[in-house]
Image: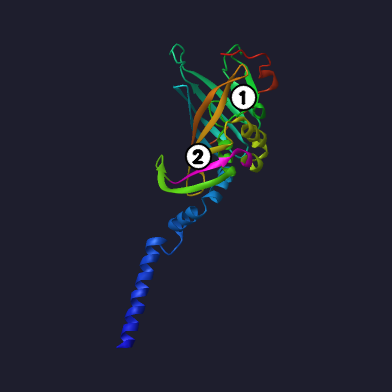
């Protein structure tokens, strides 16, 4: 009798163990096990995300930047391609109408390169066939905001400064299964860990923003590549050297079609405008 009860107990515990294994991890690793690892150490997963983009080589990108200040909200949209291995990209950024609606939407072509932003159709007295070059290390936001679109690789490298993060769960972005994380990155930490091309720009942003910490939501695919990332920046607007107000900015970058061909040729010196740029 006692022996039969022991056999029944061993059978029951074996079945229970199999059920727990099947429900929790499938007993074979796979997606569920990877999901558990991602949930266990989200900060480490986010620190690796920029490197996963370099491994992917390139991608097409869509950007959106929403700015809100003094009850006014505007949205700037962009679309283009980016080569993560060379840190070169091209975006066409569509500016919004002015508040009175008197100006038609105008697009600016932007070339993104390590330490530099090139803009064509900048307006304000710049000849139509000339480019404007901006040293991103001289910008108080490190070109996270100035160009109307956050450089996709700079957006990714911000995650190298992740201090705290939580794993929200699985969802989809444009039909692709992704893991959603939410956290906060420190700009100074990101600058220290960033690639050489982004170090000075991110260091400038750490000093120029109203807060050196940046909240974010990011969505990684099963290869650990960023499919979507949304940062929330805050900076102080100065006019004539006087503080005016704080501007809240939400910048979103969507990446897709990894491995897409990218052909970016930076302007020759003679094609860069050297005159004074008027205020618009």
Which residue, given by chain and number where applicable, does mark 1 sit on?
Answer: 118
Residue occupying image coordinates x 67% and y 27%: 138
Q: Give the image location of residue 185, x and y in percent.
A: 56, 41
Relative to the observer, which residue lies in front, 242 or 6?
242
- Find residue 191 and report its image quarter: top right
Q: Is residue 123 left or right of residue 222?
A: right
Of 57 and 32, the residue lying toward us:
32
Magenta segment includes 264:
no
Residue 13 versus residue 21 in the image, above or below: below
For label 1, the crowd category at 10 Å Cα-Cα, with few meaning under 14, some 14 to 19 and many 20 or more, is many
| Colour basis | rainbow
Residue at image location 56% in from the left, 40% down from the top: 156
Q: Is residue 212 positioned above or below 41 on the image?
A: above
Whole-percent x and y of residue 136?
A: 64, 28
Nearer to us in this view, 189 or 93: 189
**Highlighted magenta segment, given as a residue range:** 178-189
For disc 2, the marked residue is 216
Count of numbered marks? 2
């Amino acid at each position: 009798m006692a022996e039969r009860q022991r056999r029944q107990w061993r059978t029951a515990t074996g079945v229970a163990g199999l059920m727990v294994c099947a429900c929790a991890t499938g007993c074979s690793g796979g997606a569920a096990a990877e999901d558990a690892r991602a949930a266990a150490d989200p900060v480490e997963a986010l620190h690796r995300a920029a490197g996963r983009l370099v491994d992917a080589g390139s991608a097409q990108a869509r950007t959106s930047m929403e700015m809100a200040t003094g009850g006014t909200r505007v949205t700037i949209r962009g679309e283009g391609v980016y080569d993560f291995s060379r840190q070169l990209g091209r975006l066409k950024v569509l500016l919004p109408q002015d508040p009175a609606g008197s100006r038609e939407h105008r697009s600016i072509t932007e070339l993104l390169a390590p330490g530099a932003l090139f803009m064509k159709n900048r307006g304000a007295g710049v000849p139509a066939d000339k480019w404007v070059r901006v040293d991103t290390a001289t910008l108080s936001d490190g070109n996270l905001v100035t160009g109307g679109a956050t450089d996709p690789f700079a957006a990714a490298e911000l995650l190298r400064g992740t201090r705290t993060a939580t794993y929200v769960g699985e969802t989809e972005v444009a039909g692709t299964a992704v893991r959603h994380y939410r956290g906060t990155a420190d700009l100074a930490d990101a600058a220290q860990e960033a690639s050489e091309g982004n170090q000075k720009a991110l260091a400038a942003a750490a000093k120029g923003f109203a807060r050196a910490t940046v909240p974010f939501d990011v969505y990684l695919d099963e290869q650990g590549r960023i499919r979507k990332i949304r940062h929330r920046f805050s900076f102080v607007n100065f006019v004539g050297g006087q503080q005016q107000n704080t501007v809240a900015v939400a910048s979103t970058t969507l990446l897709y079609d990894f491995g897409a061909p990218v052909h970016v040729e930076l302007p020759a010196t003679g094609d860069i405008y050297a005159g004074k740029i008027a205020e618009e």
